[in-house]
Amino acid sequence: MANHGDKEHERHPQHKLSWDASLNGGYSCADCKFVGLGPRYRCTKGCNFQVHECCVPPRPDSVAVSLFGDCRFKFLDFPPGAGVDHRFCDACGTDVEGCVYHCFHCDRDLHPSCACMKDDEVIGGVKYRLRDEGKKWECVECKMRLGLEGKRTWWYVSEEDGESRLHVHCARKLLLRDA
């Protein structure tokens, strides 16, 4: 997404949202309900309405994510079975409570911010690359071999040694801490 002019959002029709390029601190996205850090769209009228860049219309109706092969994820305002089924993001392993990208073919869910994650991140001075690996590696941050609550999740793998791995959730926490 390149155009950072003021935007309208259907969940906050009373004010336009302005781009905030600040890298300071985290926030809770008012649309997908997932943690965000750094740049965001926010209401400047004191409403505390903040959203990820990926959650601001116009957003893609569907996305393909290379780590899921042929899956096609459709944007939904709420996860399938909202209020009945417990859904979690297949990238980071955390709960899906707001808008989501969902693949009906394989029944997978992604937070919008996880669907548009960077393939590469520098965390603690180390360059990491995003991977979907089925092996039970140990996360260098939390020391767990699986994701949250035993879920399979994506990993950020160190490009320096090819061995050090971070769960996406743990990488986000470290990025938030360092912001």
Image: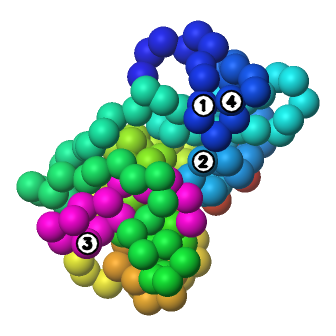
How far apart are labels 2 and 1 at the CA level?
A: 9 Å
- Is residue 104 magenta-colored? yes
Residue sitting nearer the eye, 114 or 41: 41
Looking at the image, is mark 4 or mark 3 nearer the viewer? 4
Q: Position of residue 64 (x, y in %)?
A: 20, 46
Would you name the residue on which mark 4 appears?
13
- Is residue 2 magenta-colored? no
Residue 8 visible in the displayed image: yes
How far apart are labels 1 and 3 at the CA level?
A: 27 Å
The disc placed on residue 9 is 1
Looking at the image, is mark 2 or mark 1 nearer the viewer? 1
Circle 2 SS class: loop
Q: Which residues are magenta?
A: 97-109
Residue sitting nearer the eye, 76 or 90: 76
Q: Earlier in the sequence, mark 4 or mark 3?
A: 4
Tell me whether circle 2 and circle 1 mark residues in contact (CB < 8 Å): yes
How far apart are labels 4 and 3 at the CA level?
A: 32 Å
For label 1, the crowd category at 10 Å Cα-Cα, with few meaning under 14, some 14 to 19 and many 20 or more, is some
At 48% from the left edge and 12% from the top edge, which residue is drawn?
A: 3
Among all residues in the image, which is located at the extreme left?
70
Would you name the residue on which mark 2 appears?
31
